[in-house]
Amino acid sequence: MQNMTMKQKAQQGFTLIELMIVVAIIGILASIAIPAYQDYITKAKFQDVISSAKAIETAVSMCLQENAGAPASCNTAALIGLTTLTASKEASAGWTLATSGTGVSLTTTADAAAGGRTYVNTGTTTEGSSAMAWVQSGTCLDAPAVCR
């Protein structure tokens, strides 16, 4: 009779090794997912910096085309028709416009939450053409797909 009750007793719960395997799998997944998520958040915040530049770039483009591509005519907020160069909340340093060779460069530095990288976009026109070309540079190019 005693043998019969021992055979009928079914296993209940999980063994210690099964629980340890589950914890190890969760740990491995977390060690991959958390850094990837943090990179995603940083890139998203830096995109806010880039999108805030678009209005300024449009104003600079229009100014350069209206002034025959003369960069000195378009290197301040007042000259491009804006009251201020409003930065995004992720660009702690604000925007700077400066004459750069045959064009105008737009520069800012993102705050630490957005990666702390600089974003420089230089707009130029070619003589006899109304086409505008913008070239990105800065430390944001060091990190793949941050400022593109």
Image: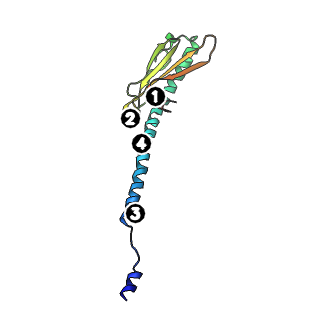
Distance (Cα) linking label 1 and label 2: 17 Å
Circle 4 residue: 35
Distance (Cα) linking label 1 and label 4: 18 Å
Q: Give the amino acid at mark 3.
A: Glu
Distance (Cα) linking label 3 and label 1: 44 Å
Circle 1 residue: 142
Q: Is residue 100 above or below residue 8?
A: above
Circle 3 residue: 18
Distance (Cα) linking label 3 and label 4: 27 Å
**Image location of residue 64, percent across then percent down:** 55, 15
Q: Give the amino acid at mark 2.
A: Ala
Q: Earlier in the sequence, mark 1 or mark 4?
A: 4
Q: Is residue 95 above or below residue 24?
A: above
Q: Earlier in the sequence, mark 1 or mark 2?
A: 2
Distance (Cα) linking label 3 and label 2: 40 Å
Q: Nearer the viewer, mark 3 or mark 1?
A: 3
**Image location of residue 83, percent across then percent down:** 45, 20
Asked whether the residues under the numbered discs 2 and 4 touch, taking CB atoms below 8 Å apart as contact, a structural biologist would say no
- Disc 1 crowd, CA 10 A, few/some/many (<14, 14-19, 20+): few
Give the SS element for disc 3: helix
